[in-house]
Image (tube, rainbow, N blue to C red):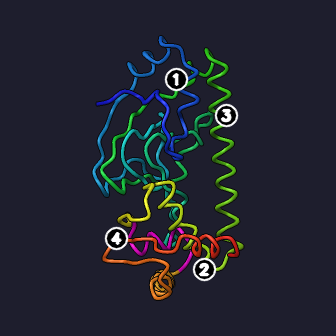
């Protein structure tokens, strides 16, 4: 299994480079020596909502979804790809996990005890500041997601997700959709029937092309306009 990635990445989804770069060589070794690498296959549950979590997870490979469920109500909070932390929300509390983490692709997770991260935060104030910046940035992303879900029309919400998958997850206009129609509905807060209808609208208008799970963005400018106007 690989160590934590301490080098820079041009990918927009790499949220941890700056915080890792603040660690000394000794602290990097301490972090790598005290992690446990686990491989989860597509569809496997990594962390279940309502269970205790005494660790911080770091996704080194793959793609996961963070979801919440209450009876028949189901929502996907966000997707995370490699070079993302998972589990900082309960780091300073004894609360149980507020969400379930599920692998959308075969994924590798490095699991580190909260005590290890706490020691690093206490030893290295610059590292602590960068971690706080990550948490703040994630809060801003959450606010933007909330605005999209509550203020935008259905076409705008789906355009947001397609652009996000293209730009932030796959870095390509052509990709295989990692989500079922139910998951796509849970991510955009709409009914599965609406997702299917709007995908068909986008295809008819030649904004995208679909073949099974494969999606190709044909008119990015128009999707961006739909996203902007909501």
Q: Residues within 10 Å of mark 1 (few under 14, many from 20)?
A: few
Closer to the N terminus: mark 2 or mark 1?
A: 1
Closer to the N terminus: mark 3 or mark 1?
A: 1
> What residue would you read off at disc 3?
132
Label 2 or label 1, whichever lies nearer to me, is 2
**Residue at horizontal 47 percent and vertical 18 percent from the top:** 28
Res 149 label: none
Closer to the N terminus: mark 4 or mark 2?
A: 2
| Quadrant assignment for the C terminus | bottom right
| Front-most of residues 103 and 4 | 4
Residue 187: give x, y in percent of width and height.
52, 67
Extreme residue in the top direction: 26
Evaluate if marks 2 and 1 touch, with contact meaning CB atoms under 8 Å apart.
no
> What residue would you read off at disc 4?
214
Closer to the N terminus: mark 4 or mark 3?
A: 3
11 to 226, vertically: above or below: above
Res 115 label: 1
Determine the CA span between mark 1 and mark 4. Answer: 43 Å
| Quadrant assignment for the N terminus | top left
Res 154 label: 2
Q: Residues within 10 Å of mark 3 (few under 14, many from 20)?
A: few
| Front-most of residues 96 and 155 | 155
| Residue 229 visible in the shown view | yes
Q: Which residues are magenta?
A: 179-190
Evaluate if marks 4 and 3 touch, with contact meaning CB atoms under 8 Å apart.
no
Q: Secondary structure at mark 1?
A: helix
Closer to the N terminus: mark 1 or mark 4?
A: 1
């Amino acid at each position: 299994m690989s160590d934590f990635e301490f080098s820079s990445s041009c990918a927009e989804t790499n949220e941890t480079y700056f915080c890792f770069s603040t660690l000394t060589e000794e602290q990097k070794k301490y972090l790598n020596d005290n992690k446990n690498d686990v491989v989860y296959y597509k569809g496997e549950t990594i962390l279940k909502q309502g269970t205790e979590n005494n660790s911080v997870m770091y996704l080194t490979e793959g793609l996961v979804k963070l979801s919440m469920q209450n009876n028949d109500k189901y929502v996907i909070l966000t997707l995370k790809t490699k070079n993302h932390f998972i589990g900082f929300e309960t780091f300073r509390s004894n609360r149980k996990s507020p969400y379930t983490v599920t692998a959308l692709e075969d994924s590798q997770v490095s699991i580190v005890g909260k005590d290890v991260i706490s020691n690093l935060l206490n030893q290295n104030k610059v590292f602590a500041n960068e971690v706080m910046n990550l948490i703040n940035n994630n809060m801003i992303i959450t606010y933007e997601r909330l605005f999209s879900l509550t203020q935008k029309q259905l076409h705008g919400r789906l355009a947001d997700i397609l652009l996000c998958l293209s730009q932030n997850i796959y870095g390509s206009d052509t990709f295989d959709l990692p989500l079922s129609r139910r998951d796509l509905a849970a991510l955009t807060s709409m009914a599965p029937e609406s997702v299917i209808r709007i995908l068909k609208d986008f295809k008819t208008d030649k904004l995208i092309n679909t073949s099974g799970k494969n999606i190709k963005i044909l008119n990015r400018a128009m999707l961006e306009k739909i996203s902007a106007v909501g």
